[in-house]
Image: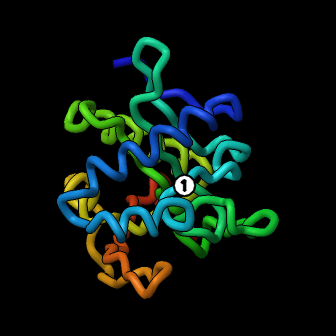
């Protein structure tokens, strides 16, 4: 496995191929084909803002992206950017949690530590930017990974999709210890 690196705009075509492959293969145990297809784009899709913000990571093997995921200091908690107009508003690390966003792994590469490596990179980066809390909207397939990293279930709910379909998801949160106790004063 190669090192985790920041994604660039040049990676977008590869990400647009990877995401549907990942969703259709690795989410199939938890969601119907109709749910997955309806979620591709509005829920599961490339968010170019994460790439522009320098908060989205990829892992490559032999020049092929085999995993991706990121974090955000913006309002959105999930979803591709195709339906979004303009930039999302920035959040204040003193009052709001960072968002863990858009993790996908190429089929055949799951359970090799890619998600863990990307999540560690996200946590290091969000802490460096002053965040002490993180939140995410996890898929049912992703929930075990995040739980292993100390994320707790805050809420289970369903995201409405087209044609009356619903996508069950899990909002998870994690508080990080303050590295400098005086910073809270």
Rendered location of residue 21, percent (x, y): 38, 43
Res 62 → quadrant: top left
Res 160 → quadrant: bottom left
Establish if 138 lies above or below 56: below
Q: Which quarter shows the C terminus?
A: bottom right
Q: Which of 11 and 156 is in front in this view?
A: 11
Residue at the extreme right of the image, as rendered: 86
Q: Which of 176 and 58 is in front in this view?
A: 58
| Residue at mark 1 | 45
Q: Which quarter shows the N terminus?
A: top left
Decide if residue 108 is on the left or right side of residue 52: left
Rendered location of residue 77, percent (x, y): 53, 68
What is the crowding at mark 1: few (fewer than 14 residues within 10 Å), some, or many (at least 20)?
A: many
Q: Residue, x 36% and y 45% (percent of image)?
A: 22
Decide if residue 148 is on the left or right side of residue 132: left
Q: Residue, x 42% and y 63% (percent of image)?
A: 37
Decide if residue 173 is on the left or right side of residue 15: left
Q: Which of 131 and 73 is in front in this view?
A: 73
Q: Residue, x 60% and y 45% (percent of image)?
A: 55
Rendered location of residue 137, percent (x, y): 41, 69
Establish if 125 lies above or below 144: above
């Amino acid at each position: 496995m190669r090192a985790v690196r920041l994604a660039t705009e040049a990676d977008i075509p590869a990400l647009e191929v990877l995401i549907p492959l990942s969703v259709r293969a690795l989410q199939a145990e938890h969601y119907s084909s109709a749910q997955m297809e309806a979620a591709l784009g509005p829920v599961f899709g490339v968010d170019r803002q994460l790439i522009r913000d320098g908060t989205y990571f990829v892992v490559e093997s032999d020049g092929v992206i085999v995993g991706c995921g990121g974090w955000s200091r913006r309002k959105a908690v999930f979803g591709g950017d195709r339906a979004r107009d303009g930039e999302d508003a920035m959040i204040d690390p003193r009052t709001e949690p960072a968002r863990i966003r858009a993790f996908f792994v190429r089929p055949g590469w799951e359970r090799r530590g890619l998600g863990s490596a990307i999540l560690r990179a996200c946590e290091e980066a969000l802490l460096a930017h002053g965040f002490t809390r993180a939140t995410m909207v996890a898929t049912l397939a992703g929930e075990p990974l995040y739980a292993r990293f100390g994320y707790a279930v805050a809420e289970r709910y369903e995201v409405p999709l087209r044609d009356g379909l619903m996508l069950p998801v899990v909002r998870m949160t994690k508080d990080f210890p303050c590295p400098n106790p005086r910073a809270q004063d």
